[in-house]
Image: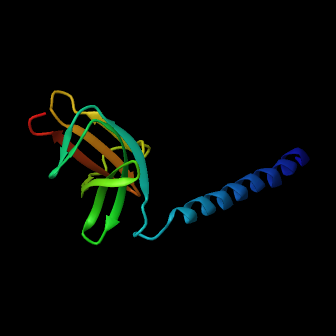
Amino acid sequence: MSRRSSWHPWIMGWIVWGLIVSALVFSSEAGPLTQEVRAGVVTLPRALQLGKTVLSPGTYEVKLVPKAEGVFFQFYQKGQLVAEDLAIEQPATRSRRTPVLHAAKVPNQEFFRILVEYGDAVYKLFLAPASGG
């Protein structure tokens, strides 16, 4: 019986420590909506169209930025903003343990898909092949 009571404070200490760490982690994730919240790097295999802008093959930094009009994807190359487009929110159908940035050629289609996690949502962007390319 004395052995059991000596473990009780030890276990309670671990539980309290876990609660404190959880509270600190979750409270530090909140932030104003006006900040840049996610970023990543994507390599485009060929020229792709984003609105009126043609993105040439190469590496781009992709950011997801909230604005008054909605959440936007922004593409940077060498620190310069080269293109942006409105992000489309995806329904929550998967676990939130998806990568922050995921880009892939869509199978059997001529599109390149980019998914970015933002808070509890996942946003997508489809890039079409550049006209004539």
> Where is residue 70, by image quadrant?
bottom left
Counting from the top left corner in percent of width and height, residue 111 is at 18, 36
Counting from the top left corner in percent of width and height, residue 108 is at 16, 27
- Say left or right for 5 vs 18: right
Counting from the top left corner in percent of width and height, residue 48 is at 20, 40
Q: Residue furthest left?
A: 132
Q: Nearer the viewer, residue 100 or 19?
A: 100
Counting from the top left corner in percent of width and height, residue 77 is at 36, 47
Q: Quadrant of the C terminus?
A: top left
How does the figure colour the protein chain or chains? rainbow
Q: Residue at x 41, y 58 (%)?
A: 119
> Where is residue 121, by image quadrant?
bottom left
Q: Residue furthest top?
A: 108
Q: Residue at x 63, y 62 (%)?
A: 24
Q: Indicate whether 27 appears above or below 47.
A: below
Q: Residue at x 84, y 46 (%)?
A: 4
- Say left or right for 102 vs 15: left
Q: Nearer the viewer, residue 22 or 113?
A: 113
Q: Nearer the viewer, residue 120 or 130?
A: 130
Q: Residue at x 48, y 68 (%)?
A: 31
- Say left or right for 51 vs 60: left
